[in-house]
Amino acid sequence: MTDMEQNRERKLQQVLYWAATTDTVRVVLLTSSLVNPYAPVDRFSDLDIELVVDDLPLFLAEPTWIENFGGIIAMVVEGEEVFDGKHAMRMVLYEDYTKIDFKIYGREEFRKAVLAEVLEEDWDIGYKIMMDKDNLTAGMKTPEYKPAFIQKPTAEAYQQLMNDFWWDMTYVAKCLWRDNLFYAKFMSEDMMRSQYLRPMIEWYIGMQHNWKVSTNKKGRLFKRYLSPELWARIEATFSGSAPEDNWRALQAYTEVGRELGQALAAGLGYTYPEKLDGQICAYLDYVKNLDRDDATEQPAILRN
């Protein structure tokens, strides 16, 4: 066990001792990756702790309880009073580098959530009851870990994503021709990678594992589930700042997007947009080979 893992275990025991000796705290749950059999755990895994207290507004008005577990480096507060009408969040990084995400419920809202027809998503990912002084967790459903699994896309979702994937390449190309690196990066990273390529990779992995697999948040486990050859082609979509490198990466996007899109279409019985693929690639070649005279954009007021 690493030093950070030992610190995390110590912090958990400190929280449990404090909760046991603090009257207003009635329930302690441990949630998320540490209690999810499908989630990876390492030295940087957070403690996700849910507390149920008698009087939530009164409890939040006395924030010094957070200091019981060590010196604080940084903290994020969500829900100054009550977040989403149900709970508040206090995310804390302590001086021993343990990070604890506290979610705090009032007892009435907690009981409503426990008795709801559908288990809260955070609980369905995984939970463990560490303390319950009043049997407030009675009737709490067993987690099925479904939110962790990649969901099979509908034909409509597949077609929409493929359409958007090819469409947004045109923006990257125009920005590169204009020497507008910042916006080109926004389109290639925020849009192309996050909105389109990531779901495509998730679907591809999900399809190969009968939709009973999790790659965790934002593609954290992609490399684990992909062949070295496919991973290398995906890595090629990353680029630096040089225009030539960004054009190379855009070409890599077309190749890996086509590969994944065609594999998904074949496996799911959907139709790959071959015509769109060919026409957009022709457009990209056209823009790349355009003369760059007067390519730099200028505000309209300066164009006279």
Image (cartoon, helix red, strand yellow):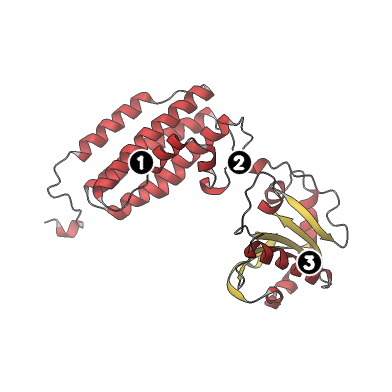
Q: Residue 90, relative to residue 194: is it above or below?
A: below
Label at residue 16: 3
For the residues bearing labels 2 and 1, Cβ distance under 8 angstroms: no
Q: Please state which of the two labelled residues, at mark 2 or mark 1, is closer to the viewer.
A: 2
The image position of residue 123, as x and y in percent, is 72, 50
Q: Can you identify the residue that label 2 sits on?
A: 214
Of the 4 image quadrants, the one containing the N terminus is bottom right
Q: Residue at x 74, y 74 (%)?
A: 58
Q: Residue 136, relative to residue 40: is it above or below?
A: below
Please, what is the three-letter code of the amino acid marked with disc 2? Answer: Ser
* Quarter occupied by residue 93: bottom right
Distance Cα–Cα, label 1 vs label 3 = 50 Å
Label at residue 168: 1
Q: Secondary structure at mark 2?
A: loop
For the residues bearing labels 3 and 2, Cβ distance under 8 angstroms: no
Distance Cα–Cα, label 2 vs label 1 = 27 Å
Q: Residue 35, relative to residue 236: is it above or below?
A: below
Q: Nearer the viewer, residue 21 or 4?
A: 4
Outermost residue, right side: 134
Q: Residue 27, relative to residue 61: is it above or below?
A: above
The image position of residue 6, as x and y in percent, is 68, 64
Horizontally, is 5 left or right of 244 in the view? Answer: right
Please, what is the three-letter code of the amino acid marked with disc 3? Answer: Leu
* Quarter occupied by residue 118: top right
Q: Residue at x 31, y 37 (%)?
A: 251
